[in-house]
Amino acid sequence: MQRGTDPKALRIAVPAVLSAILFLPSIAYPEGDPHDGTLFEPHPMSEPLYAVQPPDADPDRQQHVLKAADGVDLYVETWLPAAKGGHVPPEEIPTVVLMTPYAGYELEGLMDNGYPVEYFVSRGYAFAEHHIRGTGRSGGCLDQTGAKQIDDGARVIEYLGRDAPWSDGNVGSYGISYDGEAQTSVAGLGDPEKTKYLKAIVPVSAIGGQYEYSYFDGVPYLGWGLLQNYAFYLGVTALPTTSISPMQYLQKVGCQPEFLAASLDQSGDWTPFWHSREYRTGAPTVRAATLLVHGLADFSVLPIATAGFFDRLPETTPHKGVFGIWEHAFPDDHAVRAEWNRQDWLDMVLAWYDRYLKGLPTGVEEWPNVQVQGTDGLWRAEADWPSTGGPGGRLALGPNGKLGVTSPSGETTYSEGTGLALQDPTASRAVYETGPLAERLEVTGQPVLDLWVVLDKPDAHLVAEIETFDAAGDPIAGGINWSMRSARHLDPIVDGRFVQEEGRPAPVGVPIHIEMRFLPADLVIPKGGSVRLTLSGLLTVERFFDPTLGFGPNPLAGSGLTGSTPSGAMTTVTIVHDCAHPSILRFLMPQPMPDYLRVKDARGISPAPAEPLISDGGGIADAPVCAPTASS
């Protein structure tokens, strides 16, 4: 989504034939060679034949203003291919559009900010940039992906597909963060008569709904959504940018009072405001071929966004997913491990567009449904995400802080605390650890903690955090995960999304079951490594930035703010873990014979194991829990 106020950082950090990725026949390597596996190689067909003509070269043709439903001016500028070396572009070509709030900063600087304008335009595509309402050269108030902005986007799609002088009737879209959510929201919730021209989308790190930027299943983030929303308002709306009229500026100042007011709400309720900004509801109606991409180490737009969206896209809509270990970034330029940067990224996107915008036989239909990368760097194919269809694993909580027991017993108590400071003397926590694993363990999909607790007050905010360590005891890069749940908000999760409109007091003094869902992930713990599960009343703001990723100091560290907000009830939480009330961390593991992929990254071609790896930790993850004995 958004986040941050530096213009360049706003664009990316904080905010084709994809068919061409044919599976080639396996290369015969010597037995035991670590580079065995299925070679994944995209094969786009469009070649870089043309020069790039910027929007100001022919402003009457390439700079356009259309009217929104409420009369607001919506600005669109377009880069077009031009003749070069005897190659003349066709008169009618498809368009790739970027719908963004960041356009006012660098109208000519897209190529310096992660957007490969020249790459696409030189290959016979128009590249359009729509300045969403309230930003850049468009008028009106920023709607933060509300109904007005979605309708605006549908109108822009219609213009580019039906009326633009170069259009062949086919439109694709591209972008990360806010520019990603603009795609998914328009594709799923826009007027179908207008969006029928949208044939392919490539959303990267897009949110599933605005609620999740301020809350996690009923638990608010203290200061997080509020501070970021104010910063976003000041950074892209209230401050003058480039080439806007005085009237447009007056329209922008004072916008978003309802959004800022919603950010002040600490109830955790799913109000009508958040309901109107939930985009998963549109997933079943998306018709545009979708290449959905998200970093599993993205702690700006949490990968929980993929749950309930990717797995609810229609079978009739072509869709593929790419989910790897990187932060809020494109797959080819991230900070987790430089050698893991996907060098085939743009070829993948071009192959996707070549297939669904130009109709070229690039073979993207043969790609795996999902490419997923573990924290060990290995890629494999999966059938879906986050439900992969793999075997289930479990680690049961037990006495004395043990994780992965087969005969749990007893209970553990901790105090939620006030949460008024990072070092809260009134707070405590419950910690469970596996100890060194006998073999490699892989935790994939969307883990769930089935937790039994007894509360002494009718409210509590529960936080669970998974940490993974290698055999030397060092944290694994990207190897953390977390969950939150309000005890006042225990209604079932629906289609991957939180939908409880109003909290209710939790039962007191009796065991209650609380299901806590984690972020979709692929955590790999090597032999000799370990897993730690911590339960407490808050997640400190530092944990929103995985310290193993080396992103630099967190500006809020030491501020006294917490990443999550305790309930304020100072509840004592008793975790029950016996066979009548087994508290268990559930997850998926890869199939016994996974299809490992060899992809083009900074290493050349990524490795894959010569034979299937152990994924159950040496039996700890699939051992029966509370199994009946012969005497019973």
Image (cartoon, rainbow, N blue to C red):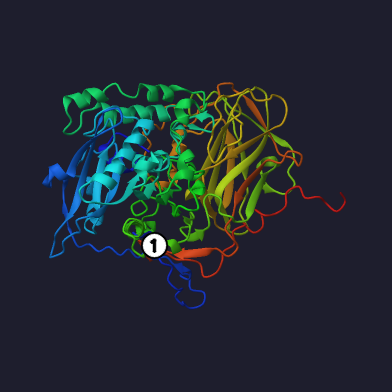
Residue at 67%, 23% (x, y): give it: 456
Q: Considering only vertical position in the picture, is 39 above or below 260?
A: below
User: Relative to the observer, which residue lies in front, 90 or 218?
Assistant: 90
Q: Is residue 398 left or right of residue 243?
A: right
User: Which residue matches tag 1?
Assistant: 19
Q: Quadrant of residue 206?
A: top left
Q: Which quadrant would the N terminus be assigned to in this image?
A: top left
The amino acid sitting under disc 1 is Ser
Residue 195 appears in the picture as rendered: yes
Q: Position of residue 415 (x, y in %)?
A: 61, 27
Q: Residue at x 65, y 37 (%)?
A: 451
Q: Position of residue 381 (x, y in %)?
A: 50, 60
Q: Position of residue 270 (x, y in %)?
A: 51, 28
Find numbered disc 1 in the image and state the secondary structure of the residue it sits on: helix
Q: Residue at x 52, y 29 (%)?
A: 219
Question: Visible in this render: residue 403?
Answer: no
Left or right side of 451 for 169 = left
For label 1, the crowd category at 10 Å Cα-Cα, with few meaning under 14, some 14 to 19 and many 20 or more, is many
| Horizontal and vertical percent position of residue 193 | 37, 42
In the rendered view, tell whether residue 1 sits above or below residue 404: above
Number of numbered discs on residues: 1
Left or right of 409? Residue 606 is: left
